[in-house]
Image (cartoon, grey):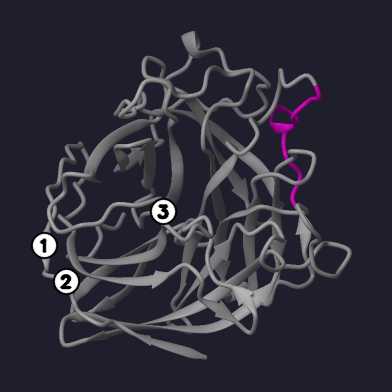
Amino acid sequence: MRHLLLSAAIAVAPLTAFAQSAQAPLPKPVLLGEFVLPTGLSIDGTGFGGLSDLSYDAQSNSFYTISDDKGDFGPPRFYTLKLDVAKGRFAGLDIASETALQKPAGGVFGLAGADGEGIAVDPAHDRMFWSSERDAKGVPAIYEAKLDGSDAKMLPLPPAYQPDAAKSHGTRDNLSFEGLDLSADGKTLYVSTENALIQDGPMATFTDHSPARIMEIDTATGKPTAQYIYMTDTIPAKPAKDGGSADNGISALATLPDGRLVLVERNYSAGVGNNIRFYVVDLSGATNINGQDKADLSKITPAKKTLWFALTPDTPDVKVDNLEDLAFGPVIDGKQTLLTATDNNFNRHQATRFKLFTMPPLPGK
């Protein structure tokens, strides 16, 4: 176990809420503090970083987080973390354990064997679900395993997600399963693609929204029961120089007790930085396209999205980075906590940034 102390608490700063919905809007989040780990930290010789999702285990009062390291700094793996919140401040964080993910046949994944992006734990059934965005052939996967990563099995995916050699069908490379979470009762697994399947529509551009998919999977059978289209934003900021890189897509997903979702859209534009938007998503009126290989956008109603709040390069007192991790945590002092984290890409110019927000209790059903 490694305990890391926060050198200085940042000021509590309220964030503007934008949610307007027929259902109860989410309460306004307040930033309690930030905890930063520099790139270069290692645990028993394995680099710490690449964090790509969070999931909270209420039984052990700990967070699980998955690394998207594809074998460059260590085997594909996950960590368990403990928060230290004292006297109204984010005071520290324990890296309690590090565990290698295992293949269905046993043993750890080799180089480029998996690209861990989503994780959701179900301690009541001693299991977790996790997603790989791609293997060496660009094929995505969703796994079910025990909480220690063992006894893994791959869930069946609809043929629509299978990429082909001509790159005319299926998930796009590095733009597939980013968001993953379980419903409050553990019966449904939600998974989202970062951008559209190739046959469904374009990637997000400065002028094009991307019709990403949100899939519901029955955890008892492991089979999909529903799929919906979610239209991402267009890329909200142009790079500082012509020809610079820019993108936008879904980077994280969390479920709410009332059945809605929170989706994070992450934009990076070179020379400008990151724009992070948190959306409340309602699937109740959306068209279920389960079983459709290609979505006919002219005949469907996409999921409804409502902006909750945003972190931009202009947000006061906040360093905005590559946010890929999101989970609602414990209730502390009568307030619901929300933990986010960033993927440092194992880049010395980036860091792993944990931000802890608090808010009034979440609305239930």
Identify residue for label 1: 13
Between residues 166 and 305, which one lies in front from this camera angle?
166
* Residue 264 place in picture, x, y as percent: 37, 45
Please, what is the three-letter code of the amino acid marked with disc 3?
Thr
Task: Give the side of residue 137 with respect to residue 93, left or right.
Answer: right
Mark 2 residue crowding within 10 angstroms, few (<14) / some (14–19) / many (20+): some
In the image, which disc is placed on residue 255?
3
Where residue 98 appears, as percent x and y from the top left, is 61, 79
Q: Is residue 276 magenta?
A: no
Q: Crowding near pointer 3: few (<14 within 10 Å), some, many (20+)?
A: many
Relative horizontal placement of residue 137, taking residue 204 as reference (left or right): right
SS label for mark 1 = strand
Q: Is residue 107 above or below residue 313?
A: below
Q: Which residue is mark 2?
A: 10
Furthest toward the top, the residue is 298
Q: Which residues are magenta?
A: 155-165
Disc nearest the viewer among 3 and 2: 2
Q: Amino acid at mark 1?
A: Ala
Q: Nearer the viewer, mark 1 or mark 2?
A: 2
Do the residues bearing badges 1 and 2 touch, measured as CB atoms within 8 Å?
Answer: yes
The tag earlier along the polypeptide, 1 or 3, is 1
Crowding at dot 1, Cα within 10 Å, few <14 / some 14-19 / many 20+, comes out as some
Considering the numbered disc 3 on the image, is that residue within a helix, a strand or a loop?
strand
